[in-house]
Every structure is written in structure tokens, then in C-alpha cells.
Image (cartoon, rainbow, N blue to C red):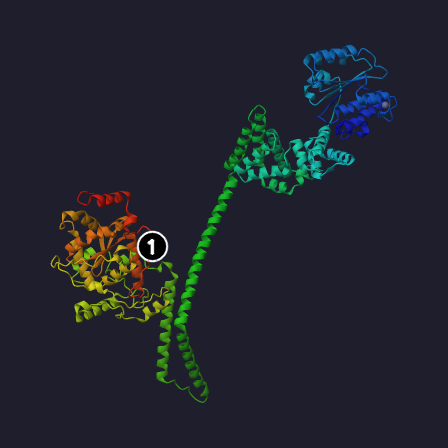
């Protein structure tokens, strides 16, 4: 048996089977009952709403041999012939294909003849609006004077295209689109009878996709059923109808709201790859925003549209501003028009999406203000957090300090207070016991003691308070600037001034430290130590001159406390500040045959060793070193003038450096860059530089070159430690990767080539600038 399409199988054969056109059915049945039959009927309405179906049922009923209560019997010959499309008296003409004037002329010829055995000769002309002007006119002639046995039933989806003169001669029936509910009911019924398994979502999707047409609904069901594996799902339906899934639409609309152009375009691309047509996508979006607008403005619980049931839709629709929806609809309608004539509709859609997202971003001032407000609030929160965390840090520091204080000093204090309280109690009891007469005066010495004790307690409390206040301020750290102007000038930058007054030994200015100041060691302490050392040095033979580390710097109570509070806790090493090898006798320039420079090319100078710097800094604090510094700086100015021509460039490079600290036969030179330092630190350079220095200074000196910034850092490190009472500060190692005095590593390609040339040809031949 040949497959019969569902819409044919389930096409209504009786008025009672017609769905959704009750008003038409009732009127037609009434006219059948009353016998008041018109000669021309116009059935208008959307496709698939049952116009031709009703026309056939009407025709059957008109010609039925045995009609039963205004219904065709369906059994008689006429009924059967009409149902099969074989009736000679019921002629169906599809004007869409037979639109010529000739067809209508043919009708005009034939209407003259009586029906063969039936009561009426019935012409059903479908899509009547498709007739040409000529055919219309021909039809009009027939309609003006129709024979009594002839009935015209004209059907059209576009009644406005039908000539008014024809319309005025017809009894008109407007078929309405079927509701989703009506179609869904039928789909469920058909699915039941056909034993299809179908999800409710799929039923709704078919009903909605059919757009009010029963025929489309049934053919969708038909196709989806043949498409589906087991149960008919929404995806099966969507792939048949070409419609978009609501989930997909919600996803797309969400991207629009998030202003996520990338994702929106990607989603659209996916839809098109899946085979959805651009116009379907645009149509679906329009529909979607229309639904959203309806949802926002009216009660949609009456609507049977499935999208109104979706939670994600409701949430999204609530969020989208109505003005925005109007804008979207404008843009989408525009696209809908444009893509009809475009060969590249996708581009229009993509541009529209960008436009929708961007222009809204530009015009949505309220949204932008809101976003800005949120940003400001965020910034405020961050700021509050920052302040909060600062306070937290300060608080924890304070807690640590007071903890330390209490651990260190308060037990003693508490004991003192306890003792005081005990004394008070005793005194009070003394008064109580003596009830008879005047209270005895406490002994004068006890009162004195009491007074002294409370003064001490007060003083200590004040000191503690002062300390906690100082510690609570993070800026309390001694800055580099302050140091460079500050207390310790023995290796500060202003050595050029010193060259004039090295004789006077002016006491360096101290930043007015109070007696109780913690954190700044009194310069006088250091001066004392230096003087002591000087005296010791005088008493000792020259070769045994040592600067002994544990030479006592007088320690105050405060510096002791600071040391205990200081987390650095450096081990104060007891080691000679001047190494023995430094105490070799001062050589006279070019006197003996022995090389005075022997031993000065010490390996430790070939690398950036922090212990060398420490040693220079330690010994730079002695008055002798200060004298030496003044002398060297004087000579330094004339370094190039007094040297031999082959050492001129070496002298020039040395002179470019600045002497910042002089120790015992060694000093620190600073340069602006690490590469300059590396150059003068290399053994190759030193082989020329050290003899030059020996010549100029009259003594064998070595040096360390440092970049300015590193020098300042190290110096600060040193002073900070010294200021809190560490007599011989230990510095952290040099960690700048650019510092390297290694010959091979730092050679530039040119330098390498040059040294290679010298190796092969000899220094006399190769002269390199
Ligand atoms: Zn019949």
C-alpha cells in the first residue's frame, strides 16, 4: 500500500471534524439547513487552515444524496467521488498553476451545461488572487450572471489582491489561524492513533512551527516521525521545521545582553552551519523579542506559547529594557527586508548583531552610569581593603613589639609594681590597725622610696608609649636620603668638601637624636670608639695595628633594648677589621728591584665579593682612612695628567669613576652602569690599572667598582645596621646578575675578536681604540 501522507489521512471529511473554524462551519450548516445557498463564496485565511477542506465538505454536503443533519453522508457516490477528487460536477482549479484567461473561459463555456446527476456544478478555485487581470475579468462576467446550478467557492490567502468587484459578489468567510493549543491537541490525537512516541516539547514545537496551519503541522509530524529514531524530540522537530530551539534563542539573547559579540557571532555561525536559514534566524529573533516584550507588558499566562513556560526566558525578559527591545526589533526588521534581496544574507545578520550590541552600548546611558557606579564602588572596596590591610599589618607589628616589650621588660616592671602595691597595702593596714588615735605618719624614707618608684614607673611607661608610637609608623624607617645628609658622613658622598677640612675633623652632624632615641646610635659613641682605637694604635707597633672588633662602643640601656628588638640579630663577629696582608709596609715607588705589586692581584678582587666591600666600609671609618681618602681624591683629579701615554686610556676610565669609600689600601669606585664596572673589575684591566695606581698613589692600592645604585643600596644597608648598634654590619651578597668580572663571559664580540687578534699578532701590532 502506498504511503499516504498524514495530512491526507487525517483531513476532515465532515464538518464536525473541522478544527478551529466553528463560526464558518456553523454558518455553512445553517445555510444548508435553510437552503439559502449563495452562488459565490470566498474563503480567505492563512494556508493550511482548512479552506479547501471545508470547501470540499461543503460541496459534498450540497450534492449529497443522503445528507444527515447538515453533514455529507460520506457514503453516497457523490460523496465518495468528491473525496477521491473524481467528481465530474466538482471542479478544483489551482489558480497558482492554471492562471490563464483560457482556463476561466473554459469554465464560462462549461457552466452552461447542467451537472451530471448532481444538484450543483461546483467550481473550487484555489489561490484565486493569482489569476491574471484578464482571467479575473472573465470570472467576473460569469459571476455577474451565474446559472442557478453553479456555485463558485474561491479560496485565497491574500484576499486584498482579489478585485473588489469580485469580493462584492461573494459571501466571504475568513478562516482564522489555528491556535497552538488546537494544533497540539490534534498532533497528540494523531500521534496516539499512529502510535508515535513524542515529547510534549516536540508537540508544542510542531504546533508553534506550523504557525496556525493544520496541514503544515501534520506534515511536520509526518517528517519528524520518519526522522526520529524512537521518540520524536524537539531536535527532530526543529530540524524539520528549520526553527530555532528556544534554548538556542535564549542563549543568543543572553550574549546580546552581555555585549559578548564574539560569542553571539559564534552562536549564529553554529546555527547556519546546522543548516538554519538566515531568514529563519532573523525571524526567530524577532519572534523572541516580541515574546519578551509581551511577557514584560501583559499577562502571558493566557498564551499557550511554550516559551513563556521557560524559566530562563522569564529571567532574561525581565532583565531586558523595553526600549532596547524596540531597538532590536527595528534593527532585525531592517535586516529581514534587506536579506530578501541579498545573496549574502549572513553578512547582514552579522552586522546587525554587532550593531545591536554596540549601539545599545553607546546609547544605554543608564546602563553605563550604573556600570561606572559599580566600578567606583569596587575601587572604594579595594581602597578600603588596602587601608584595612595596612592597619592589620600595623596592628600585628604593634602587637609583636608590645609582646617583645612585655617579654623583655615588663616582668621586671610587673614585679616592681607588685612590690609597690604590697608596700601600699602594708601602709594601709598600718593605718587600720591603729584605731585609737591619729594615724601614724609613714616613715619619711618609705615615702621617698615610694615617690622614686612611681617616678620610675611613669618614666618607663612614657618611654614605652613613645616606642609603640614610633613602631606604629611605617615611614619610621630611615630613608636613604636622610642618611646621605645625615649622621654618618665618614663615607658619604660629600667627600669633596672633606678634602678641605680633613685636618679639622669636624664632627659630623647628627640629626638631633635625643638621649632616648632608639634606632640612631649616637655618633659620639662611635667617635669615642675611634679615638680609643687611635690611642691603642699609637701604643702598638706599626705592623701589629689591628682594629679589633670588640673594641667597646659604650652601650646605652637603649641600644641594648633595640638590639633585642631588632629582628636582624646579626652576629657581631670578632675579627680584625684590617687583614694582615693589608698591613704590609708602604712601598716606595720604584725603589727596590722587587715588584711592590706582588700579591696585590688578589683573586678576591676579581669577583664582586661583598666581604671586600664590608672590609672597606669597616676600615673607612678610621681617621687614617679618612685622611687617605682626601689624599687619593686630590691625586685622582690629576690621574690622566701624570701617567704615561700607553696608560692614558686606562687612567681616563679610572678617572671616570668616583671614589666613595677608602679603606686600608683599597677603595670603592662607582660608575653609572654595571658594564663599566665589569670592565674595570676584569683582571685584564687591573693588570694595567693597579701599576698605574701604584705609580700615582705611591702605594699599592686595589679597588672594587660598583654601579651607583648598588653602592647606595649597600651603603644604606650598612648604615641601617650600624645605626641600630651593629658595630660591624654584614651585608647581603650582590645579587645583580649584570655584575660579572669574568673575562670570557662579559666580552662583547668585538672585544673577543680584538683579544683574539692580540693573541695571534701580538699587542704591538694590534692597536685597538
Ligand atoms: Zn453523501
Q: Give the farthest residue toward the bottom.
A: 436
**Quarter of image, res 81:** top right
Quarter that holds the C terminus: top left
Q: Position of residue 395 (x, y in %)?
A: 43, 62
Residue 464 horizontal side relative to residue 287, left or right: left
The crowding category of the residue bearing disc 1, from other C-alpha atoms within 10 Å (few below 14, some 14 to 19, many at least 20), is few
Q: Residue at x 56, y 29 (%)?
A: 346
Quarter that holds the N terminus: top right
**Quarter of image, res 139:** top right
**Residue receiving disc 1:** 735
Q: Is residue 146 above or below residue 758?
A: above
Q: Residue at x 43, y 83 (%)?
A: 426
Q: Position of residue 768 (x, y in %)?
A: 20, 43
Residue 98 horizontal side relative to residue 535, left or right: right
Residue 45 horizontal side relative to residue 119, left or right: left
In front: 263, or 590?
Answer: 590
In front: 398, or 302?
Answer: 398
Dot 1: what SS?
Answer: loop
Q: Give the farthest residue toward the left.
A: 591
* Displayed-image quarter of ligand 1: top right
Amino acid at each position: 500500500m502506498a504511503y499516504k501522507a498524514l495530512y491526507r489521512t487525517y483531513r476532515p471529511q465532515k464538518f464536525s471534524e473541522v478544527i478551529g473554524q466553528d463560526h464558518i462551519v456553523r454558518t455553512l450548516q445553517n445555510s444548508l439547513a435553510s437552503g439559502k445557498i449563495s452562488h459565490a463564496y470566498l474563503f480567505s485565511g492563512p494556508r493550511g487552515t482548512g479552506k479547501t477542506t471545508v470547501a470540499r465538505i461543503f460541496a459534498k454536503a450540497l450534492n449529497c444524496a443522503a445528507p444527515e443533519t447538515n453533514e455529507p453522508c460520506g457514503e453516497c457516490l457523490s460523496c465518495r467521488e468528491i473525496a477521491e477528487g473524481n467528481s465530474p460536477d466538482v471542479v478544483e482549479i489551482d489558480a497558482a498553476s492554471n492562471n490563464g484567461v483560457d482556463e476561466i473561459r473554459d469554465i464560462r463555456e462549461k457552466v452552461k451545461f447542467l451537472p451530471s446527476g448532481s444538484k450543483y456544478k461546483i467550481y473550487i478555485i484555489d489561490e484565486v488572487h493569482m489569476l491574471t487581470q484578464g482571467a479575473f475579468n472573465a470570472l467576473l462576467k460569469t459571476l455577474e450572471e451565474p446559472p442557478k446550478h453553479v456555485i463558485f467557492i474561491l479560496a485565497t490567502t491574500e484576499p486584498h489582491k482579489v478585485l473588489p468587484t469580485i469580493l462584492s459578489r461573494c459571501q466571504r468567510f475568513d478562516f482564522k489561524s489555528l491556535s497552538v493549543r488546537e494544533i497540539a491537541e490534534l498532533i497528540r490525537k494523531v500521534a496516539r492513533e499512529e502510535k508515535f512516541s513524542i515529547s510534549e516539547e516536540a508537540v508544542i514545537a510542531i504546533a508553534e512551527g506550523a504557525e496556525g496551519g493544520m496541514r503544515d503541522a501534520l506534515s511536520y509530524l509526518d517528517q519528524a516521525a520518519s526522522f526520529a529514531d524512537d521518540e520524536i524530540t524537539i531536535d527532530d522537530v526543529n530540524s524539520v521545521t528549520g526553527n530555532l530551539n528556544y534554548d538556542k534563542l535564549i542563549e543568543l539573547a543572553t550574549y546580546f545582553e552581555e555585549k559578548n559579540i564574539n560569542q553571539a557571532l559564534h552562536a549564529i555561525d553554529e546555527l547556519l552551519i546546522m543548516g538554519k536559514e538566515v531568514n529563519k534566524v532573523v525571524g526567530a529573533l524577532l519572534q523572541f523579542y516580541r515574546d519578551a516584550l509581551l511577557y514584560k507588558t501583559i499577562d502571558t499566562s493566557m498564551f499557550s506559547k511554550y516559551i513563556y513556560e521557560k524559566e530562563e526566558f522569564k529571567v532574561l525578559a525581565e532583565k531586558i529594557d523595553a526600549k532596547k527591545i524596540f531597538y532590536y526589533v527595528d534593527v532585525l526588521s531592517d535586516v529581514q527586508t534587506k536579506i530578501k534581496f541579498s545573496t549574502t544574507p549572513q553578512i547582514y545578520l552579522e552586522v546587525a548583531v554587532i550593531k545591536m550590541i554596540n549601539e545599545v552600548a553607546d546609547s544605554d546611558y543608564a546602563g553605563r552610569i550604573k556600570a561606572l557606579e559599580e566600578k567606583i564602588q569596587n575601587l572604594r572596596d579595594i581602597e578600603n581593603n588596602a587601608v584595612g590591610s595596612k592597619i592589620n599589618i600595623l596592628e600585628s607589628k604593634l602587637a609583636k613589639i608590645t609582646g617583645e616589650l612585655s617579654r623583655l621588660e615588663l616582668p621586671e616592671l610587673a614585679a616592681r609594681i607588685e612590690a609597690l602595691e604590697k608596700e601600699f597595702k602594708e601602709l594601709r593596714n598600718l593605718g587600720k590597725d591603729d584605731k585609737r588615735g591619729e594615724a601614724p605618719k609613714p616613715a619619711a624614707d618609705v615615702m621617698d622610696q615610694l615617690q622614686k618608684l612611681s617616678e620610675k614607673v611613669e618614666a618607663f611607661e612614657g618611654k614605652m608609649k613613645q616606642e609603640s608610637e614610633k613602631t606604629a609608623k611605617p615611614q619610621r624607617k630611615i630613608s636613604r636620603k636622610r642618611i646621605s645628609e645625615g649622621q654618618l658622613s665618614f663615607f658619604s658622598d660629600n667627600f669633596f668638601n672633606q678634602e678641605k677640612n680633613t685636618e679639622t675633623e669636624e664632627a659630623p652632624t647628627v640629626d638631633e637624636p635625643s638621649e632616648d632615641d632608639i634606632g640612631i646610635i649616637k655618633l659620639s659613641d662611635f667617635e669615642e670608639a675611634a679615638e680609643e682605637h687611635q690611642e691603642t694604635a699609637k701604643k702598638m707597633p706599626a705592623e701589629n695595628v689591628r682594629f679589633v672588633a670588640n673594641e667597646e662602643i659604650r652601650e646605652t640601656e637603649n641600644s641594648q633594648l633595640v638590639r633585642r628588638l631588632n629582628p636582624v640579630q646579626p652576629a657581631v663577629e670578632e675579627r680584625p677589621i684590617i687583614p694582615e696582608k693589608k698591613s704590609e709596609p708602604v712601598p716606595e715607588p720604584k725603589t727596590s728591584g722587587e715588584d711592590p705589586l706582588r700579591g696585590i692581584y688578589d683573586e678576591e678582587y676579581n669577583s664582586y665579593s661583598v666581604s671586600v666591600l664590608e672590609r672597606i666600609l669597616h676600615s673607612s671609618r678610621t681617621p687614617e682612612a679618612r685622611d687617605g681618602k682626601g689624599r687619593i681624591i686630590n691625586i685622582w683629579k690629576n690621574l690622566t695628567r701624570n701617567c704615561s701615554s700607553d696608560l692614558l686610556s686606562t687612567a681616563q676610565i679610572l678617572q671616570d669613576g668616583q671614589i666613595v669609600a677608602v679603606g686600608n689600601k683599597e677603595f670603592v669606585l662607582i660608575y653609572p652602569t654595571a658594564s663599566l664596572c665589569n670592565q674595570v673589575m676584569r683582571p685584564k684591566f687591573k693588570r694595567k690599572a693597579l701599576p698605574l695606581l701604584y705609580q700615582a698613589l705611591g702605594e699599592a692600592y686595589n679597588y672594587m667598582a660598583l654601579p651607583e645604585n648598588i653602592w647606595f643600596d649597600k651603603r644604606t644597608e650598612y648604615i641601617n645596621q650600624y645605626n641600630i648598634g651593629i658595630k660591624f654590619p654584614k651585608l647581603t651578597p650582590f645579587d645583580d646578575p649584570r655584575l660579572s668580572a669574568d673575562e670570557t663571559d662579559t666580552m662583547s664580540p668585538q672585544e673577543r675578536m680584538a683579544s683574539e687578534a692580540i693573541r695571534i699578532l701580538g699587542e704591538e701590532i694590534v692597536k685597538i681604540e
